[in-house]
Image: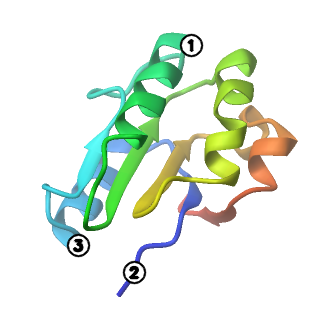
Amino acid sequence: MSFVSKIIISSNFEAVKEKLLSEYSSSIIKFIPKEVTDEFLMDNAKEVQRESFIAENKEKIIVIMANSFRNEAQNFLLKLFEEPPKNIKFLLVSPSRNLLLATVRSRFICENLK
């Protein structure tokens, strides 16, 4: 079964992380940043971009978890979200849908786990 890029609305980041690790091999999941952060910054966005362009012959899920997201970091990733490299999927985890720009929200399905 193939993973679909999406947004998950939840403030229980640990539960989301545990669920992902129980459902998917840890070799295909990449958490950026490695630990949940208060704010997703431009440096984090650049790390997501770098990781996305590391060629994979199997599916890789890049998980982005933060309590808030800088607008410039979101804007930086828009093109990547719209046209991801082959085998790259994204999972954004946020405590609120409204913390994400409308242009980001429009590129993903949204699932509420509250």
Describe the element under mark 2 as helix, strand or loop.
loop
Question: Is residue 53 placed above or below 9 in the rendered structure?
Answer: above
- Which is more foreground, mark 1 or mark 3? 1
Where is residue 45 drawn, in percent x and y? 52, 24
Please state if 42 lies on the left or on the right of 83 as rendered. left
The quarter of the image holding the C terminus is bottom right
Residue at 22% of width from left, 68% of height from top?
Answer: 24
Query: Dot 2: within a 10 Å radius of its alpha carbon, few (fewer than 14), some, or many (20 or more) residues?
Result: few
Please rate how many residues cluster around mark 3, counting C-alpha atoms within 10 Å: few if below 14, some from 14 to 19, many from 20: few
Q: Residue at x 22, y 58 (%)?
A: 28
Q: Which residue is mark 3?
A: 23
Q: Secondary structure at mark 3?
A: helix
Q: Residues within 10 Å of mark 1 (few under 14, many from 20)?
A: some
Determine whether, in the image, residue 76 is placed left or right of residue 18: right
Question: Do callouts 3 and 2 mark residues in contact (Cβ within 8 Å)?
Answer: no
Q: Which residue is mark 2?
A: 2
Amino acid type, callout 2: Ser
- Of the residues tagged 3 and 2, which is closer to the observer? 2
Q: Amino acid at mark 3?
A: Glu
In the displayed structure, 42 sits above or below 105; it is: above
Q: Nearer the viewer, residue 86 or 7?
A: 86
Q: Which callout, 3 or 2, points at the residue further toward the start of the chain?
A: 2
Left or right, 15 with respect to 27, comes to right
- Indicate whether 48 appears above or below 23: above
In the image, residue 36 above or below residue 3: above
User: Which of marks 3 and 1 precedes in the sequence?
Assistant: 3
Q: Which residue was labeled with disc 1? A: 42
Q: Quadrant of residue 26?
A: bottom left
Q: Position of residue 23 (x, y in %)?
A: 23, 72
Is the N terminus in the top left, top right, bottom left or bottom right quadrant? bottom left
